[in-house]
Image: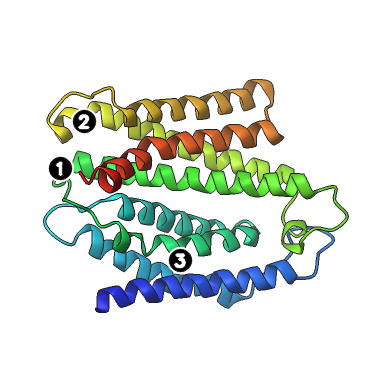
């Protein structure tokens, strides 16, 4: 019962924080310079409470027994948790409170997913350092590229409503689009490097981790396609100056394919096929 209570309290706290930012940021007065809303000190640290509880629930669900119980619910929850942590840290350097209204409600739902979709069986060979490194790198890569996707969505909304007579203050108080675009590509670069390491480690350590050579599976196929999309985006940015809508579309396309690569396969196997 105490374990379930931690899930519920974390979800409630995320929801309250999301509601607070939605109410204050969408109704805040517009600043002429853009991006000048200074968050009170308590707002920066309030999210630490649900983050700590979220981390506790993940520990309980993933390390509940022998080995790692890393089902689709725990995977999504871990990605959202890491996304929230990375965004919280980046919030000290960039005024992007608008994303807080998107991440907190998502986290409020994601923290409950291990209860709804529990792991059916522990992962094999989780005592191997190569496997643990592979999982950690993969989760960081997915989290950073999740941030990139959310950032691209926010940029798309701002760009679409830029020339309208009225616009919510949370959008007008964001930094200029060029600044947001620069931050977007910084996040994509780091996420792409980690995704590259994830794919390489999956190939190199496949026999050690899974006791068999790497296979051409649905997961591997979409993983490499996603890598190719992000590689093409970064190359297009470097050599052809891709930006704006082109960058947003390629970012979202790569993220969707990445979701199909990992979460899609886990969802089909664990939830639909019950394997």
Q: Which mark is residue 128?
A: 1
Residue drawn 36% across the image and 46% down it: 139
Q: Choose between 1 and 93: the one closer to the eye.
A: 1
Residue 114: where, in percent of width, then height? 30, 60
Residue 32: where, in percent of width, then height? 85, 61
Q: Is residue 220 above or below residue 44?
A: above
Q: Choose between 51 and 124: the one closer to the eye.
A: 124
Q: Is residue 1 left or right of residue 101?
A: left
Residue drawn 33% across the image and 75% down it: 6
Mark 3–mark 2 CB contact (< 8 Å): no
Residue 15: where, in percent of width, then height? 51, 71
Secondary structure, mark 1, is loop
Upstream in the sequence, badge 1 or badge 3?
3
Residue named by callout 2 = 205
Residue situated furthest front in the rendering: 272
Q: Choose between 145 and 34: the one closer to the eye.
A: 145
Q: How far apart, in angstroms, are the residues tagged by discs 1 and 2?
A: 10 Å
């Amino acid at each position: 019962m105490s374990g379930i209570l931690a899930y519920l309290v974390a979800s409630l706290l995320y929801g309250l924080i999301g509601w607070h930012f939605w109410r204050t940021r969408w109704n805040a007065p517009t600043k002429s310079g853009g991006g000048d809303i200074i968050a009170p000190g308590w707002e920066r640290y309030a999210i630490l409470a649900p983050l700590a509880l979220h981390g506790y629930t993940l520990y309980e669900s993933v390390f509940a027994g022998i080995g790692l119980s890393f089902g689709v619910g725990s995977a999504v929850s871990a990605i959202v948790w890491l996304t929230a942590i990375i965004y919280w840290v980046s919030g000290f350097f960039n005024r992007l409170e608008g994303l807080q209204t998107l991440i907190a409600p998502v986290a409020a739902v994601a923290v409950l997913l291990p209860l709804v979709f529990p792991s059916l069986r522990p992962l094999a060979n989780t005592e191997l350092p190569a496997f643990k490194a592979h999982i950690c790198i993969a989760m960081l890569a997915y989290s950073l590229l999740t941030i990139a996707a959310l950032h691209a969505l926010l940029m798309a909304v701002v760009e679409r409503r830029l020339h309208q007579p009225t616009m919510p203050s949370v959008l007008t108080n964001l930094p200029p689009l060029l600044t947001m675009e620069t931050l977007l590509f910084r996040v994509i670069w780091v996420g792409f490097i980690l995704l590259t390491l994830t794919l390489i480690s999956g190939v190199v350590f496949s026999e050690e981790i899974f006791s068999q050579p790497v296979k051409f599976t649905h997961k591997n196929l979409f993983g490499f396609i996603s890598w190719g999309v992000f590689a093409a985006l970064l190359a297009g940015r470097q050599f052809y100056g891709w930006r704006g809508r082109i960058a947003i579309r390629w970012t979202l396309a790569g993220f969707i394919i990445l979701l199909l690569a990992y979460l899609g396969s886990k969802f089909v196997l664990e939830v639909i096929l019950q394997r």
